[in-house]
């Protein structure tokens, strides 16, 4: 135990460890807040879908040799998010099917474009890095961290400010818009924020992790609580805890960061499930 | 004062269900919408609320009626089975339209939610989980939510479905008092002919032959007589 603590203190001296912890925790917090709504709106896989769209856009941007791929990637992803979340309940194609189409389509086109025009020699490696984030969370720069802090603060503020409106449009969108809540506007805000968080998170931690961060905390919290408020607060807290624990464990044990965080999430989910079942008896 | 005016309305999804619908609702009216299953009653209500666009024609709202003053009870909620929400949270969300950009509910709105719950006899369920209630109890909560939202007009899509006979009677009495005492305009979809003729001031019948008029006119009209006959009621001695 003492050895472990010593090791942790030693690692704490490295800025990259502190950066990783800060960014991991913040991204986890944002993802969990949005996750409750997304899971309830049947958009659990939006993290996966949108990050694949972002990947496709990135591939096109790199082939076009754009100086900065961010505007294109962000633009395309936001558009897709608006289309998916904004289409709402009245669309002909159901949300999950539309998302699957976007996700698989963008992934295939992106890979094809990269394959046809790529200049890089390590194609498979590039693709793998984009999808799984590899170790990118351990190679963050100071400006990455600042950008993440600002964006997260913005997301949390927006979420608190619009909390009751988000509840209303998630619970019953038709009722909300029939009785004078501008559901379209709040869906749009939700879509843009989701897209921004996902692109940010994808650059930092990879797309495998972002999906898990969206789904697991919300699902765990729903095993235990039955009010929207409690679920939201608990999933935010749980997500922060899992991210921090996962990063610490991965540093101590030398395991891959993303996969470790997801494993911690799975363990807490099983725990919550068990406690929920026991509490029901 | 006319509050809702429908001119040459055609309703439906791909093909029209009803064409050439003309009617208007004035302040203080109690309109009952009748018709068989699938005749387009719920579709009409959604079109009036702007949740769906009409195929032809238009719905115009009278001056001074804002969406924030309308209460709505949908036929089936889209609320998912596993949605974590308490009765209180659901009821309070009825006041959301009145909040505008304000992020939190104020005292008046909370008081209104509490009163609505009491009216529906659901006050002691406030902290219970909505998904764990029975169908009839859920219906009452949604009615309480509709009451929170309504200050001028209340649109109800089969409000008594799932309620037990006593609750059903209370419900009709309550809607009646909202209409008579508070001057609230009521649009109600119903399959309960007797109650419709007893309480409503106007009837809109959707079917092969559309009818719109007062209750008295309805029992004497051709679609009215046919409908009453199907329902096994004696001809128009109830009105
Ligand atoms: N989302 C939809 N897409 C396509 N058609 C629909 C949709 N909803 C309803 N319909 C069709 O429109 C018709 C009218 O439906 P509506 O729900 O308005 O009937 P209703 O009069 O309310 O019936 P009920 O008494 O059973 O509630 C039905 O034939 C139905 O199949
Ligand atoms: Mg109906």
Image (tube, coloured by chain):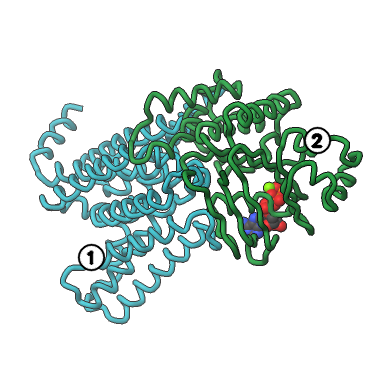
**Does A95 appear above or below B95?**
below
In this rendered view, identify the residue nearer to me: A259 or B13: B13
Subunit ID for the residue under disc 2 = B
Q: Residue drawn at (48%, 62%), measured in percent from left and top?
A: A98
**Does B32 appear above or below A89?**
above
* Labelled pair 2, 1 in contact (Cβ < 8 Å): no
Q: Residues within 10 Å of mark 2 (few under 14, many from 20)?
A: few
Q: Is residue B66 left or right of residue B195?
A: left
| Residue B40 position within the rendered picture, expressed as x and y whole percent measured from the top left | 69, 54
**Does A7 appear above or below B20?**
above
| Residue B210 position within the rendered picture, expressed as x and y whole percent measured from the top left | 75, 56
Instruction: Give the quarter of the figure containing the C terminus of chain A.
Output: top right
In this structure image, what is the colour of chain A? cyan
Q: Which of label 2 and label 1 is nearer to you?
A: 2
Q: What's the CA distance linking mark 2 and mark 1?
A: 64 Å
Q: Is residue A15 left or right of residue B100?
A: left
| Residue B115 position within the rendered picture, expressed as x and y whole percent measured from the top left | 52, 22
Subunit ID for the residue under disc 1 = A
In this rendered view, identify the residue nearer to me: B148 or B203: B203
Instruction: Give the quarter of the figure containing the N terminus of chain A.
Output: top left
Q: Which label sits on residue A71?
A: 1
In this rendered view, identify the residue nearer to me: B83 or A164: A164
Q: Tell which residue pokes out farthest to the bottom in this image.
A: A116
In this structure image, what is the colour of chain B? green
Q: Residue drawn at (64%, 39%), measured in percent from left and top?
A: B29
Can you identify the residue that label 2 sits on?
Answer: B194
In this rendered view, identify the residue nearer to me: B204 or A213: B204
For the residues beneath circles 2 and 1, the answer to whether they share a chain is no
Q: Tell which residue pokes out farthest to the front in this image.
A: B1
Q: The residue tagged with tag 2: helix, strand or loop?
A: helix
| Residue B17 position within the rendered picture, expressed as x and y whole percent measured from the top left | 70, 61
Q: Residues within 10 Å of mark 1 (few under 14, many from 20)?
A: few
């Amino acid at each position: 135990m003492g050895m472990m603590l010593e090791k942790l203190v030693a690692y704490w001296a490295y800025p990259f460890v502190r950066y990783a912890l800060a960014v991991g925790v913040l991204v986890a917090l944002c993802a969990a807040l949005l996750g409750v709504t997304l899971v309830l709106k049947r958009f659990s896989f939006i993290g996966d879908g949108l990050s694949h769209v972002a990947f496709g856009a990135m591939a096109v941007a790199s082939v076009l040799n754009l100086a900065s791929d961010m505007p294109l990637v962000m633009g395309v992803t936001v558009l897709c998010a608006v289309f998916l979340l904004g289409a709402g309940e009245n669309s002909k194609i159901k949300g999950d099917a539309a998302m699957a189409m976007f996700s698989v389509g963008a992934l295939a086109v992106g890979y094809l474009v990269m394959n046809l025009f790529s200049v890089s020699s390590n194609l498979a490696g590039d693709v793998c890095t984009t999808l799984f984030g590899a170790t990118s969370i351990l190679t963050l720069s100071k400006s990455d961290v600042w950008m993440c802090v600002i964006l997260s603060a913005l997301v949390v503020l927006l979420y608190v400010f619009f909390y009751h409106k988000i509840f209303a449009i998630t619970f019953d969108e038709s009722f909300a818009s029939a009785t004078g809540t501008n559901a379209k506007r709040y869906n749009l805000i939700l879509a843009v924020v989701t897209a921004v968080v996902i692109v940010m998170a994808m650059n930092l931690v990879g797309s495998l992790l972002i999906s898990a961060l969206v789904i697991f905390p919300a699902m765990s919290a729903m095993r235990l609580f039955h009010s929207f408020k409690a679920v939201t607060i608990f999933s935010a807290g749980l997500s922060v805890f899992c991210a921090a624990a996962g990063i610490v464990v991965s540093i101590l044990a030398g395991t891959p960061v993303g996969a470790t965080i997801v494993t911690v999430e799975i363990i807490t989910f099983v725990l919550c499930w068990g406690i929920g079942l026991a509490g029901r008896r | 004062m006319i509050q809702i005016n429908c001119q040459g309305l055609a309703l439906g999804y791909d093909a029209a269900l009803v064409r050439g619908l003309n009617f208007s609702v004035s302040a203080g009216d109690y309109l009952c919408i009748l018709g068989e299953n699938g005749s387009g009653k719920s579709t009409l209500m959604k079109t009036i609320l702007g949740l769906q666009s009409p195929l032809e024609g238009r719905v115009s709202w009278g001056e001074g009626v804002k969406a924030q003053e309308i209460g709505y009870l949908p036929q089936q909620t889209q609320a998912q089975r596993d949605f974590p929400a308490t009765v209180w949270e659901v009821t309070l969300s009825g006041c959301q339209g009145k909040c505008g950009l304000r992020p939190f509910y104020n005292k008046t709105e909370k008081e209104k939610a509490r009163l609505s719950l009491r009216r529906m006899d659901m006050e002691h369920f406030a902290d219970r989980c909505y998904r764990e209630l029975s169908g009839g109890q859920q219906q009452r909560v949604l009615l309480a939510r509709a009451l929170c939202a309504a200050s001028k007009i209340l649109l109800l899509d089969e409000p008594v479905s799932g309620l037990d006979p006593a609750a059903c009677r209370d419900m009709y009495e309550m809607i009646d008092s909202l209409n008579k005492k508070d001057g609230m305009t009521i649009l109600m979809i119903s399959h309960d002919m007797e109650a419709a003729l007893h309480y409503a001031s106007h009837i809109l019948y959707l079917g092969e032959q559309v009818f719109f008029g007062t209750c008295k006119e309805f029992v004497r009209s051709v679609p009215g007589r046919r409908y009453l006959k199907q329902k096994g009621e004696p001809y128009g001695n109830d009105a």
